[in-house]
Image (tube, grey):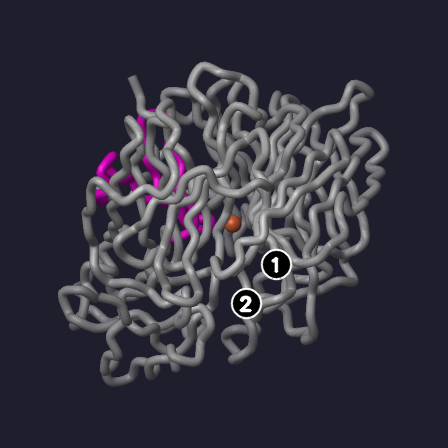
């Protein structure tokens, strides 16, 4: 069963949005409401016998029709979809991330909170004193496992801990060490086991970074990033052995404008874009300035032998959809080479920019030199919503080659790398993602061979329900 339920809002609450005409509430993004478990799934082709673990993917999935506004990809109840693979067989389950706000709405049988742009929150008479006036928690963007925790991640807010079977444990503050939470794209250093995070906020300190040790305890509590004196939106980060890398596009929160009925977010290209290089050893930080661009996502970064930093990321001329400008914007995989001492930076597209996002590398290479970056991309042959792709692109940055798999009638999500257990060679692993057919809305888990991904899937697992298009995922090998 699909379809979100139109609901009569409380008196004083904004009316429901027109979900049927919102591209991120309809079509392949249309939310699902059932939480199901399904085993022994149909496999077309053959799942690699060594593949053993779970692929989890999060994404916005409003349980009820949003009230007043809906801004993709920043809001919506989180739903995690899981695909377990072992011994050539697969099972599936999906669960909402059950925040107290979502559970209050489920108990009421309707939406109670207004969309982000409305600022509307329900009163104590509807949700009790503990939730009255609170903003809705939105752990709907990503999922990560670290330090014994499985976390559904929000945008610079506390994440929610999940059980291995995706039941919600509750809001996670790491023993009170990170009360404001963390970003949706923390990075786990495969060499040290540390998870490095940042968090932005509407009040000073506007930007902090923290480090969690391999055991999940705070090794560095939130530390202010200097010279950031306005609230700025930053979605992703990168890590090298020496530096935390943050791209600060000129996208500011403007609470005063929002109070006057204007936009909460303000794009000011005249300020240019700054890249912060924060030494992980606590030394003085470095800035590099360049002309304005926007980046949602980084692929990876690494230190070079001559003291520089390479950052591969998807560059946009501006944040389409969130900035007030109109007209098309096109994203492309780009490489920034930064000289930390001089603050100099050069940027070049690694491939003709033609609309791509969700860059991923083999996570075992995070912070070190990588070769292949995989992305979702658009062939241009189909009318697709923002965040929807009809092809997967692999760019070999070392060899200067790329290969595309045209997904035909399938819309595909973010690619994710699955290593072959005990084998460091990435060409012996696989790339996986969820995909949904635009003609019959059937959903699939697809597996590409790392050695020749452009040849297409070696296995497709039929999911017995539709998996709405979403955001970010992770492959989590079965733990010993
Ligand atoms: Fe993201």
Q: Name the residue rendered at 56%, 48% in the picture.
A: 358
Residue 348: name its quadrant: top right
Q: Name the residue rendered at 54%, 68% in the picture.
A: 264
> How many numbered marks are there?
2
Q: Name the residue rendered at 15%, 70% in the picture.
A: 108
- Per the image, is 142 magenta? yes
Residue 67: horizontal and vertical position, in percent?
Answer: 34, 76
Residue 10 visible at all: no
Q: Secondary structure at mark 1?
A: loop
> Label 2 near label 1: C-beta < 8 Å?
yes
Quadrant of the frame with the N terminus: bottom left
- Closest to the observer, 242 or 419: 419
Residue on which disc 1 sits: 378
Left or right placement of residue 269 versus residue 105 in this view: right
- Per the image, is 247 magenta? no
Mark 1 vs mark 2, CA separation in Å: 8 Å
Residue 50: horizontal and vertical position, in percent?
Answer: 37, 23
Check the image and report above or below for 358 versus 202.
above
Quadrant of the frame with the C terminus: top left
- Closest to the observer, 54 or 108: 54
Question: From this viewpoint, which residue is outermost toward the left?
Answer: 107
Residue 247: name its quadrant: top right
Residue on which disc 2 sits: 384
Q: Which residues are magenta?
A: 140-168
Task: Tell me which label, 1 or 2, sits earlier in the chain.
Answer: 1
């Amino acid at each position: 069963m699909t379809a979100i339920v139109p609901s009569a809002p409380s008196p004083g609450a904004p009316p429901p949005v027109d979900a049927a005409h919102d591209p991120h509430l309809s079509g392949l993004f249309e939310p699902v409401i059932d939480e199901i478990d399904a085993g022994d799934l149909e496999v077309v082709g053959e799942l690699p016998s060594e593949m053993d673990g779970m692929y989890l993917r999060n994404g916005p999935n409003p349980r009820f029709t949003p009230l007043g506004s809906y801004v993709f990809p920043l809001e919506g109840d989180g739903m995690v979809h899981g695909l377990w693979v072992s011994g050539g067989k697969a099972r599936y389950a999906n669960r909402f991330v059950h925040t107290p706000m979502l559970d209050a709405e489920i108990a009421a049988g309707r939406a109670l909170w207004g969309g982000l742009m409305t600022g509307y929150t329900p009163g104590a008479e509807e949700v009790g004193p503990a939730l009255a006036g609170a903003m809705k928690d939105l752990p709907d963007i990503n999922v990560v496992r670290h330090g014994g925790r499985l976390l559904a991640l929000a945008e610079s807010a506390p994440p929610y801990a999940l059980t291995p079977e995706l039941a919600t444990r509750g809001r996670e503050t790491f023993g009170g060490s990170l009360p404001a939470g963390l970003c949706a794209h923390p990075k786990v250093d495969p060499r040290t086991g540390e998870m490095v995070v940042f968090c932005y906020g509407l009040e000073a300190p506007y930007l902090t970074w923290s480090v969690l040790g391999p055991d999940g305890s705070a090794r560095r509590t939130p530390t202010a990033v200097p010279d950031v004196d306005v609230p700025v939106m930053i979605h992703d980060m990168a890590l090298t052995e020496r530096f935390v890398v943050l791209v600060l596009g000129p996208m500011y929160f403007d609470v005063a404008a929002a109070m006057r009925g204007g936009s909460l977010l303000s794009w000011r290209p005249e300020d240019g874009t700054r890249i912060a290089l924060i030494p992980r050893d606590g030394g003085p930080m470095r800035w590099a300035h360049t002309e304005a661009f926007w980046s949602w996502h980084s692929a990876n970064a690494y230190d070079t032998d001559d003291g520089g930093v390479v950052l591969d990321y998807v560059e946009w001329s501006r944040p389409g959809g969130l900035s007030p400008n109109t007209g098309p914007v096109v994203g492309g995989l780009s490489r920034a080479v930064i000289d930390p001492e001089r603050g100099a930076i050069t940027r070049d597209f690694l491939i003709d920019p033609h609309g791509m996002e969700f860059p991923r590398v083999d996570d075992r290479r995070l912070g070190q030199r990588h070769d292949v970056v995989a992305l979702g991309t658009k062939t241009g042959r189909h009318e697709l919503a923002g965040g929807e792709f009809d092809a997967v692109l692999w760019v070999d940055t070392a060899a200067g080659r790329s290969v595309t798999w045209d997904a035909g009638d399938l819309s595909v999500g973010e690619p994710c790398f699955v290593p072959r257990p005990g084998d460091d060679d990435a060409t012996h692993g696989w790339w996986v993602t969820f995909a949904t057919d635009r003609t019959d809305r059937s959903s699939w888990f697809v597996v590409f061979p790392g050695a020749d991904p452009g040849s297409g899937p070696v296995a497709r697992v039929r999911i017995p329900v539709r998996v709405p298009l979403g955001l970010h995922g992770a492959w989590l090998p079965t733990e010993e």
